[in-house]
Amino acid sequence: MRWRQKDWNITEVMLSLLIIFVVYNIVGTIVALAFKRSLLASSLSYALVFCPLVLACTAWVLKRHGRGMADLVNSPLSWKRILLYGLSGAPVSLVLGYGVLFLILMIIYALGGRIPEELRDQGFYASGPAGLILTIFVVVILAPVFEETFFRGLLYPTLRNRLGPAYAVLLNGLIFGVLHFQPLYMLSLVLVGVVLALIYEKTESIVAPMLAHGLYNALVMVIALLLRWELF
């Protein structure tokens, strides 16, 4: 399905974006207050609130244009090329994202003499095996599938058809990074979003950025577990 056929209306996509993040953040705030920032509760709210909202909004937009989910998956490239882009995107994202993060940490440490509190272990293991397993499932499986469905499947074509590929890639990455609401990681996430948008631009299938996103998140989980860094 070529770009010109992915003619989602900017109004309906922005409305979907507003609905998803307003509702999810309201619920997330309530959950955080009720469960004292429990990792298990945060993962459950993501799985039970964010994912269904993305699915519902995506289905609504596609139905309005007589399209289906297959139109976000199909690509003019072979599956081998799609897999190649997906597999190569993860290490590129990791190098760029963590390269910038460590540079920022070096500057913060040089100025303040310590690493930010956000990176200290604040209960990553406290939720027990159930919380850890659910978090891995959310981060490695659910987040790549549903975030790529929205950010690349819906948002990117809308931007591309109006701004062209270069500006669309940059703006898509910027929105992706900012909406994660993690100031310390924001620049890194913007760069990751840019890489994922480039992958989608090259393949026109959300499968490739989903794969890259999932592998990237898996590598980040390994790093977080080894260094006992807090993810959320």
Image: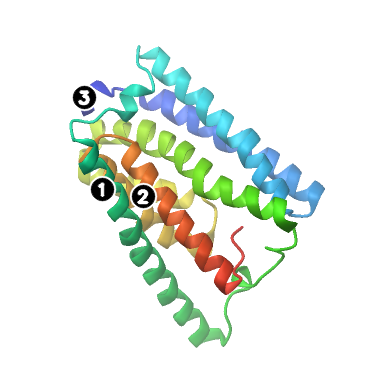
Residue wearing tag 1: 85
**In which quadrant of the rendered view does residue 182 lie?**
bottom right
Crowding around mark 3 (Cα neighbors within 10 Å: few <14, some 14 to 19, many 20+) is: few
Of 142 and 64, the residue lying toward us: 142
Q: Earlier in the sequence, mark 3 or mark 2?
A: 3
Q: Secondary structure at mark 2?
A: helix
Q: Secondary structure at mark 1?
A: helix
Badge 3 amino acid: Arg
Q: CA distance from mark 3 to mark 2?
A: 25 Å
Say the numbered circle drawn on residue 4: 3
Residue 98 placement (x, y as % from top left) = 41, 68
Say the numbered circle drawn on residue 220: none
Q: CA distance from mark 3 to mark 1?
A: 22 Å
Residue 181 placement (x, y as % from top left) = 54, 53
Residue 89 placement (x, y as % from top left) = 30, 53
Badge 2 amino acid: Ala
Q: Are marks 3 and 1 in contact (CB under 8 Å)?
A: no
**In which quadrant of the rendered view does residue 6 lie?**
top left
Say the numbered circle drawn on residue 212: 2
**Residue in view at x 41 percent, y 49 percent:** 213
Crowding around mark 1 (Cα neighbors within 10 Å: few <14, some 14 to 19, many 20+) is: many
Of 167 and 105, the residue lying toward us: 105
Q: Earlier in the sequence, mark 3 or mark 1?
A: 3
Q: Are marks 2 and 1 in contact (CB under 8 Å)?
A: yes
Number of numbered callouts drawn: 3
Of 107 and 99, the residue lying toward us: 99
Q: CA distance from mark 2 to mark 1?
A: 8 Å
Crowding around mark 2 (Cα neighbors within 10 Å: few <14, some 14 to 19, many 20+) is: many
